[in-house]
Amino acid sequence: VSDNDYFNDFGSLGQESRSKINLRLVAGVSYKTDNWDYRVEAQDHQIIIDGLEKQYSVLPKVTANGHYRFYNNLVVNLNNQTARFDHDDSDLVTGDRHRVDYGISWDKRWSWGYFRPQFRLKHLAYNLDQQPSSNLSDVSALTVPVSSLDTSLFFERPASFFDGYTQTLEPRLYY
């Protein structure tokens, strides 16, 4: 936007538009194959309130997400992302973030319900630039296994109060 009063100049905009403090700027390119989605993007913010600190820029953010289905029920997800966080202020921490989220699940579906146990391995790592005023470690990482069970049943019957409608009850267990 051209100046910090850009949204206020319109006068009759809703509270949501008038209360914005920054605008997210994103540019990216994507490519998709049968099993993979690739994306490279840059992200920045334009501050539109006087006196606020500039936010971090993300340049580049590279994502590669894979999705495979075997034997109709076995699903493998391979999600990868790496991003570079930067800031104009040399006193703030900058660096790279690497995220991996791999999962395998058995996705069995019927007309009357579904059963979906899943196991995931999530890994997050930061490689921080040397910051003279920071007490942070240069490299930090965390790996966590995650398991879940998601199952549901579908009960349907004709609605007793309205002709032509269906009454549905779908109890679900997610742990």
Image (cartoon, grey):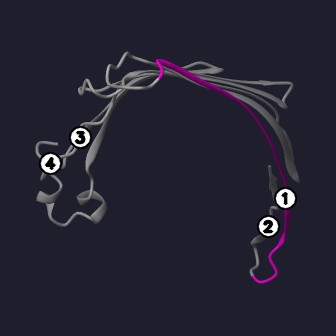
Residue at (83% x, 41% y) in the render: 116
Residue at (86% x, 51% y) in the render: 113
The residue indicated by pointer 4 is 50
Q: Which one is in front, 99 or 94?
A: 94
Residue 118 percent location from the top left of the image: 80, 36
Q: Quadrant of residue 67?
A: top right
Q: Earlier in the sequence, mark 4 or mark 2?
A: 4
How far apart, in angstroms, are the residues tagged by discs 1 and 4?
Answer: 54 Å
Q: Which one is in front, 80 or 71?
A: 80
The residue indicated by pointer 1 is 154
How far apart, in angstroms, are the residues tagged by discs 2 and 1?
Answer: 7 Å
Above or below, comparing residue 153 to residue 110 in the picture = below
Q: Which amino acid, mark 4?
A: Asp
Q: Which amino acid, mark 3?
A: Glu
- Tags 4 and 2 touching, CB below 8 Å: no
Residue at (13% x, 48% y) in the render: 4
- Tags 2 and 1 touching, CB below 8 Å: yes
SS class, disc 2: strand
Q: Quadrant of residue 101?
A: top right
Q: Earlier in the sequence, mark 1 or mark 3?
A: 3
Q: Quadrant of the N terminus?
A: top left
Return the mark for residue 168.
Answer: 2
Point out the stretch of residues depicted in magenta: 137-161
The residue indicated by pointer 3 is 53
Q: Which amino acid, mark 2?
A: Thr
